[in-house]
Image (cartoon, helix red, strand yellow):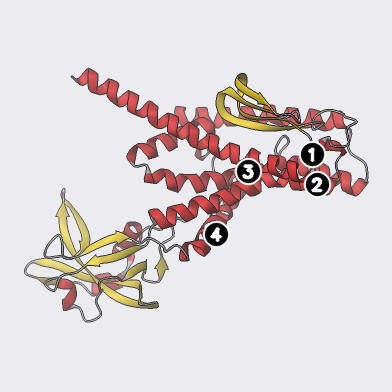
Amino acid sequence: MNYLLSIGSSLSFIWYILVAILALLLMVMIHEFGHYVAGKILGFKINEFSVGFGPKIWQKKKKNGELFSLRTIPLGGYCAFDGEDENSNSPTAFNNQKPWKRLIVLFMGAFFNFLSAIIFSYILLVSCGYEQVQVKSISNTSFQYQVENHLEVGDRIYGINGTEFDFVDDQYFNSLLGDYVRTSLDFEEDMWTSAGVDYSTIPLNVERDGKKIVVDGVLQKQMVDGEEVWSFVSTDTKDFQLKTYRHGFVESIGESFTFTCRWAQKICIILGDLFTGQLSIKSLGGPVTTIKVMAETTQQSYSYLLVLLPVIAVNLAVFNLLPIPSLDGARMVFVFIEWIRRKPINRDVEAYIHGFGLLLLLGFVIVVDILQFVL
């Protein structure tokens, strides 16, 4: 019986891995589709648009010569422009196009990732919401009503003691609650005992009827597995209920843009800490680690996948704009140099730099993946 359960668990995890691979493949395809759309609009000749790497499984050739293919290794893909890595006399070849056109084509991959992150963030905020909570119900028997400035049904709690919940900076409802209990002197001073139970109040930042106010939440101390745990007071499990706040359709439009921009900002800060040595390389992960994390997270709940999608999309957008050889950012640097000099750097030298950079990049992601599994 245990053997059958073990097989079932393994097959289940394999399914989540497949879901994670498809999600990552979607992110990469969105990036390459950005290059493709820009190239088509600006008149670039495109040789192939491929989903995956390695030997071909399926292919279809259009009348204009463009090849669409599906390949065996589902960890990426590419949009191959004519004359991108070789010399060509065709006026529609990549390197024969004007610099501003090439810059747009190179930039649009990251832009499509960023745009998709906004869309995924919008879906997340509308369907699931994130670390903002709303009071669902409070009965008249609840101890909450013995506090003059108490919570009311419908209140949206967006912060504790002036610190707002921030999913991007890992400032969650429960974490801020714990921080306040551990560090606030006011919390100790406001404590009282009733019928042998310790109580205290906690200042909550609340939005009520469109106005932002501060109200008092009442906590009671309970012993759980020998440890003191403070939780919101309730005389019955149905008296006081919190639910995740879901943003409205219109509200989510602006919020999703802000959410995405703040993630991009955080990723830039993390990269800065990495280059200055303030962040260890062990905290990073390559595609294998990304798939593992996505599979484990999705196994807990498919809704968690909605959280990961915008984060991964922003990561791809920012990372591809870095001036690292073989990435779009470095290719854009070479185009800028050509634009300023009015002549390109030797194409063979540029190809060598990008090829060498690609090898280093592949080696780097392999190392960080190994470090994640070994350490």
In three-dimensional space, the C-alpha distance between marks 1 and 2, rounded to whole angstroms, equals 9 Å
Position in image of residue 305 (x %, y %): 42, 43
Q: Is residue 244 left or right of residue 144?
A: right
Res. 15 image quadrant: top left
In three-dimensional space, the C-alpha distance between marks 4 and 3, rounded to whole angstroms, equals 19 Å
Position in image of residue 109 (x %, y %): 66, 43
Q: Is residue 321 left or right of residue 351?
A: left
Residue sitting at x 38%, y 46%:
303
Residue sitting at x 41%, y 67%:
163
**Could you say which is closer to the camera, residue 73 or residue 48?**
48
- Type of residue at label 2? Lys
- Type of residue at label 3? Phe
Position in image of residue 199 (x %, y %): 17, 69
In three-dimensional space, the C-alpha distance between marks 4 and 1, rounded to whole angstroms, equals 31 Å
Q: Which of the two labelled residues, at mark 4 and mark 3, occupies the earlier sequence position?
A: 4
Residue sitting at x 41%, y 58%:
171
In three-dimensional space, the C-alpha distance between marks 2 and 4, rounded to whole angstroms, equals 27 Å
Query: In the rendered image, which residue does mark 3 sit on?
Result: 319
Query: In the rendered image, which residue does mark 4 sit on?
Result: 257
Q: Which of the two labelled residues, at mark 1 and mark 2, occupies the earlier sequence position?
A: 1
Callouts 4 and 1 close, C-beta under 8 Å: no
Q: Which of the two labelled residues, at mark 2 and mark 4, occupies the earlier sequence position?
A: 2
In three-dimensional space, the C-alpha distance between marks 2 and 3, rounded to whole angstroms, equals 21 Å
Query: In the rendered image, which residue does mark 1 sit on?
Result: 44
Q: Which of the two labelled residues, at mark 4 and mark 1, occupies the earlier sequence position?
A: 1
Give the SS element for disc 4: helix
Q: Is residue 203 left or right of residue 147?
A: right
Query: In the rendered image, which residue does mark 2 sit on?
Result: 101
270 lies above or below 297: below
- Type of residue at label 1? Phe
**Could you say which is closer to the camera, residue 361 or residue 130?**
130
